[in-house]
Every structure is written in structure tokens, then in C-alpha cells.
Image: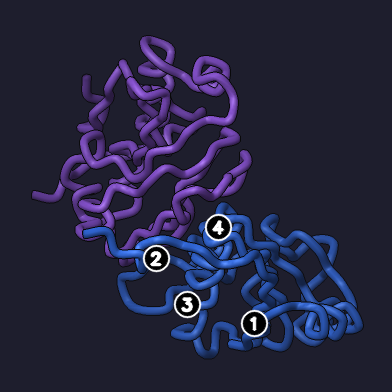
Chain colours: A purple, B blue
């Protein structure tokens, strides 16, 4: 599914502004990444650092810091969680976030609530798709991927 | 091989950025907000205190058109990025009249507080790090 050239994955979970995605893993953890919208807004990502594994992150405390040539800011966090690990491939080659935003996860976290409860405030499926497309159109975001 | 340099392990600290630069030195007006965004994203409690010519940046209609370099983002965009990352924007009340800025009508919406000079002194003494641009 694509809106304004921005890819959308209906099986993932999204925050209300579609800045990040979350995916459920078999071991009870969640992977966190940037959406195609976010990577396009940020531009070429030069640097990313993740909170140290084992660090507890309450809602509002970011899991990572991202820096591009024109933007710097947090990878926001909306759940009470603990950092398991960063994706070393992405940490070493940050532009993977621009090339493959849904494959290039940033961090793996363990929610400190049951997974379903932790994900209850996120959007997924058709509702997420509608919101994602609205955001792309309302903010006139057109996505580009690095190759 | 995992490189621990990729991981953040800093304590939470407070940072005060004193912004005295303004439109006459536009090239100095983007970096403080960029730095503030990164610091806030790294869990620092960041305040940017606008005084001297810096208050021109929080006057409506100034930062919206000002750029630090040709073709770059406007300063208001840098300021909004910083706000989105959690940075607080504080205006120095005594500096406003000298630039004919009306506290009631002329300030941009991004300003969180307008305070007196004594608050700046207090922030300098209580912040973990103080930087001036």
C-alpha cells in the first residue's frame, strides 16, 4: 500500500502521528522503527544512537536519537519498556533507515506490560492506513528512498 | 561486533542555552536549535533563553523568513524541531522593549515563558551545563 509514494505496512502498529512503527516478535519483544513518512521528513540519516540495553524507558522517554543533515530529534517512545538491543547494522549504517525503513528496525524493546496491553494505544490495519494516508496528504509529504 | 559507542548511557542533565544572536548574524541562528534538539532527544532538560538580539528571533515574522545559509531551512523550522524534541523556549522580558517587541502581541506561539533577568541568573546557577551562542 502506498500513499504519496510513501509505503505503508498494514500488519505493523503505529503511533497517532505515524512517526514510528512497532512489530510483535515471537519472543514477546517489540521491534521499533521509523516509518517511510519519518525517514522522508528527516532526509539522509547520518547518525543514530540507541539507549543502552537494559535501560528502562517510560512513556515519553525516547529509545534513540537520530540525526540527519537537516534534522535532529528523538525516536519517540509511547510505552513503558526496557531496551533489549539496537540493530547493529542500522547503527553502523544509518542510511539503511532511508533505504528500507520497514526492514531496518532500530531497537528491540520488551514492554513492561503484556504486549497486547502495551499496543492497545497504537493503530494498525485499515484504521492505521486511513490515518497514514491522511497525514501524507494533509502535510503534503512525498516519500523518496535512497538507493 | 557490537560497538558500545552506539549506545547512549548518559545521566539526565539540565542544559541552558543562552541565545544572544539574532538576524544580524543569521548564520549563528540554526545550530543552537539543532543542538538543543539532540540534547533533548538524549534526555537532557533543555531550555533556550533568548536575550539581547536573540529576542528578535521570537518576534512574529522574523524567524519565519530567516535562514542560516542560502537554501537551508528557516530558523522557525529549526525552532519547531527543537520544541517537538522537548526544548523549552524562554524569553527575557527586560530585553523586549529595546527591540520594540510587545509581550502581548508580538511573540511567536512557540514561546513557553517570559521571565525577568533574575530567572536567568537562577538558571545559570542551577543548570548542569550552560552554553552561549
> Which comes before the other along the chain, label 1 or label 2?
1
> Which comes before the other along the chain, label 2 or label 3?
3
Check disc 2 and report the residue beneath it: B73
Which numbered circle lies on residue B80? 4
Give the distance between the C-alpha atoms of the residues marked 1 and 4, in whole angstroms: 16 Å
Give the distance between the C-alpha atoms of the residues marked 3 and 1, in whole angstroms: 11 Å
Check disc 1 and report the residue beneath it: B19
Q: Which of the pair A134/A117 is nearer the observer?
A: A117
> What residue lies at 36% left-to-right and 34% top-to-bottom?
A31
Report the side of A59 relative to A25 (left or right). right
> Which comes before the other along the chain, label 2 or label 4?
2
Above-or-below relation of B95 to A97: below
Chain assignment, label 4 = B
Which numbered circle lies on residue B31? 3
Whether residues under marks 3 and 4 lie with C-beta atoms below 8 angstroms apart, the answer is no
Which quadrant holds residue B86? Answer: bottom right
Amino acid at each position: 500500500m502506498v500513499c504519496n509514494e510513501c509505503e505503508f505496512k498494514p500488519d505493523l502498529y503505529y503511533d497517532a502521528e505515524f512517526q514510528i512503527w512497532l512489530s510483535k516478535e515471537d519472543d514477546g519483544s517489540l521491534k521499533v522503527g521509523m516509518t517511510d513518512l519519518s525517514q522522508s521528513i528527516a532526509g539522509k540519516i547520518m547518525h543514530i544512537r540507541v539507549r543502552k540495553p537494559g535501560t528502562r524507558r517510560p512513556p515519553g522517554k525516547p529509545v534513540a536519537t537520530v540525526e540527519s543533515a537537516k534534522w535532529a530529534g528523538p525516536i519517540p517512545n509511547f510505552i513503558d519498556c526496557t531496551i533489549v538491543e539496537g540493530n547493529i547494522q542500522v547503527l553502523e549504517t544509518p542510511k539503511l533507515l532511508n533505504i528500507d525503513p520497514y526492514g531496518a528496525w532500530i531497537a528491540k524493546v520488551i514492554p513492561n506490560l503484556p504486549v497486547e496491553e502495551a499496543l492497545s494505544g497504537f493503530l494498525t490495519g485499515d484504521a492505521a492506513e486511513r490515518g497514514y494516508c491522511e497525514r501524507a496528504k494533509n502535510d503534503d509529504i512525498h516519500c523518496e528512498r535512497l538507493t | 561486533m557490537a560497538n558500545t559507542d552506539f549506545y547512549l548511557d548518559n545521566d539526565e542533565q539540565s542544559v541552558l542555552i543562552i541565545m544572544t544572536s539574532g538576524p544580524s548574524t543569521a548564520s549563528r541562528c540554526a545550530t543552537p536549535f539543532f543542538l538543543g534538539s539532540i540534547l533533548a532527544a538524549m534526555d537532557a532538560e533543555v531550555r533556550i533563553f533568548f536575550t539581547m538580539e536573540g529576542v528578535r528571533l521570537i518576534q512574529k515574522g522574523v524567524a519565519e523568513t530567516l535562514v542560516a545559509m542560502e537554501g537551508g531551512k528557516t530558523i522557525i523550522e529549526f525552532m519547531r524541531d527543537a520544541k517537538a524534541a522537548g526544548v523549552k523556549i524562554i524569553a527575557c522580558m527586560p530585553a523586549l522593549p529595546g527591540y520594540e517587541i510587545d509581550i502581548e502581541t508580538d511573540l511567536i506561539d512557540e514561546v513557553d515563558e517570559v521571565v525577568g533577568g533574575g530567572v536567568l541568573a537562577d538558571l545559570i546557577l542551577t543548570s548542569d551545563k550552560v552554553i552561549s551562542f
